[in-house]
Image (cartoon, rainbow, N blue to C red):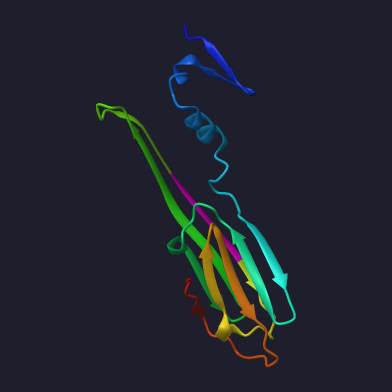
Amino acid sequence: MSSIVKRGNNFLPSFFQGWNDDFLSNFLDRDNINMMPAINVIETANDFKIEVAAPGLEKKDFKIKLDKNILEISAEKEIHKEEHDKDSKFLRKEFGHTSFSRSFNLPNYADTEKISASQKDGVLTVMIPKNTTPEARPIKEIDIK
């Protein structure tokens, strides 16, 4: 018969006691997996700025696509984590997959030829200048610098 350990509101068998506390909180909460990132959309007189808070994601994980007046920002990342004991015996292995996609309907006065993007410190920033001349918009991908 195993004893019970109370962690917050969760009761777990005592065999979890020897595991690192981060494992339990990461396993039980999963707060970064399959969550929609926070997004700010800021309009000034000259441009629009979209900020995507996505800590843990790198520039290579994002894709930005423009189809006519629809700007799509998406990301996808596979997560792998392994822990071994000092004798290299298998102890624990976790994996996961996270992804999201957000679309924005741009106004006709957005200058789609001059859209730029950058990523720094867990925040993707997309700058969309304004243009006074509406234009037809082909499908295009935006490089992240």
- Image height check: is 1 above or below 120? above
How far from the left and from the top, in percent, is residue 111? 62, 85
| Residue drawn at 47 percent across, 6 percent down | 1
How far from the left and from the top, in percent, is residue 62? 48, 64
- Image height check: is 14 above or below 110? above
Reply yes or no: does residue 97 show up in magenta: yes
Residue furthest to the left: 87
| Residue drawn at 67 percent across, 84 percent down | 130
Residue furthest to the front: 121
Residue 101: quadrant of the picture: bottom right
| In the displayed structure image, the side of residue 130 where residue 56 appears, left or right | left
Residue 53: quadrant of the picture: bottom right
Which span of residues is magenta-colored? 96-102
Dominant secondary structure of the residues highlighted in magenta in the image: strand
| Residue drawn at 61 percent across, 68 percent down | 103
How far from the left and from the top, in percent, is residue 70? 61, 75
- Image height check: is 120 above or below 78? below
Residue 52: quadrant of the picture: bottom right
Residue furthest to the top: 1
Reply yes or no: does residue 41 show up in magenta: no
